[in-house]
Amino acid sequence: MEGKRIVLGVTGGIAAYKAADLCSRLSKLGAKVQVIMTAGATRFITPLTFQTLSRHHVFVDVFEEQDPSVVSHIDVADHADLMVIAPATANLIAKMAHGIADDMLTTTALATRAPILVAPAMNVHMYQHWTVQENIARLKARGVEFIDPVEGLLACGYEGQGKLAEPADIVAKIQSMLAKKRDWSGRTVLVTAGPTREPLDPVRFFSNRSSGKMGYAIAEAAQKRGARVLLVTGPTRLLPPAGVEVFAVETADQMYETVLSLLPDADVVFKSAAVADYAPVQVAEQKIKKVSDQIQVQLRRTPDILAEICKRRRPDQCIVGFAAETEQVSRYALDKLERKGADFIVANDVSQADIGFDTDANRVEVYGRNGFFHTWPKMSKREVADRLLDLILKHVLEKETR
């Protein structure tokens, strides 16, 4: 923490008093803390408190330009190693999610390229409201990190999740973010994610239940660890992670062509998309009308993207396939590993409701050549992504030293 520049944003909630403790802890650890307060925050605690604790001027007004040689919010944003907003109100989270910049704090948040940590604090019903949760999800998809509020008796008299996380826990999270590995720097990662859609007519298509969450988690984790990330994605409802190069496709044929065109640039391929195995032979130009009790659709095999990648690979490339199974997971995963020629297969049982399609958690088994096998407990897909990156990087580094 010594010498790190931390921008501490304080918003107008009763938990603002805890931000003073946070500021003090960061300063004692050697960080240079620059505090920015909203007008509402000054109704709960004075700027003088933070100025005394940080030994730096506290910004409140975006038009307050003390140094004519710089624009204050840009200068603060440019020199930040990390920005933390604690407490963060529902209003502030909404502004960030929608790019509103109408005060010193929001303009700085919009201008900085430093990692951002948000610590929400509000009434339990406000925190659980779908709008707030949607805004949080939007920010997470853009790479903003959150430390969840904790449960307890709230200032409003309600009891539930809404209390600001303890300053000590926020400091620990800040330290973790500042110490994050950049061990994938200099490498290019190609990730496929989501389903494909195979049209039957202009309004109907064949597809599957994949949400794309696993592939997007891998793309986000790799980018944050320094990799250049090429994300080839089928149709999803997810916002692409910040900093990745996105190639949107719809059909299996489009994904096939796009992946093969990008393959020469990749060092590692995570082929996690759930590509349709079959597509209609005939695609009607107009909507098919309901004129009979039955309809027959002839299907054709779509290109086998994983098998083709493995055929065209360079010796130094690492290929990771995925297998979504509903039974005999080990058997089918090992068979896929052998038939396709990948280095690893990551398999999971999607018939399990808590780790199946469109969930935030996963429980996977990883199979590799020479009898390599790992089974991991249930964890978030983001945690699975980081574990995979650790595992694959170790394999790549061992390969490079042979």
Image (cartoon, grey):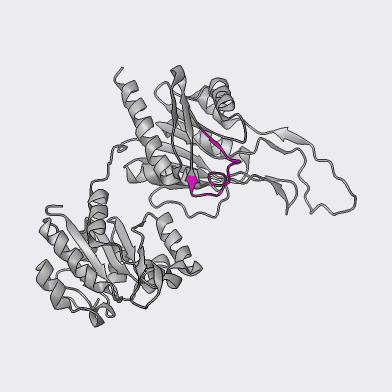
Residue 28 image point, x, y percent: 11, 59
Q: Quadrant of the C terminus?
A: top left
Q: Is residue 359 magenta?
A: yes
User: Residue most toward the right?
Assistant: 292
The answer to whether residue 323 is left or right of residue 114 is right
Q: For residue 121, which quarter of the picture? A: bottom left
Whether residue 124 appears in magenta in the rendering, the answer is no
Q: Which residues are magenta?
A: 347-361
Above or below: residue 366 compared with residue 179? above
Q: Nearer the viewer, residue 59 or 29?
A: 29
| Residue 402 located left or right of residue 271 | left
Residue furthest out toward the bottom: 43
- Residue 305 in the image: above or below residue 40: above
Depicted 33 relative to depicted 101: above or below: above
Viewer can see residue 394 = yes
Please identify the quarter of the rendering in which residue 64 is found. Answer: bottom left
* 14 or 70, nearer to the observer: 14
* Residue 115, horizontal then vertical, whole percent: 29, 55
Left or right: where 169 falls relative to 372:
left
Q: Give above or below for 81 relative to 130.
A: above
Give percent across and percent down for residue 88.
33, 68
Classify residue 81 as left or right of residue 322.
left
The answer to whether residue 68 shows anywhere in this view is no
Q: Residue at x 48, y 55 (%)?
A: 239
In-front residue for pair 155/243? 155
Characterize the magenta stretch by its predominant secondary structure. Answer: loop
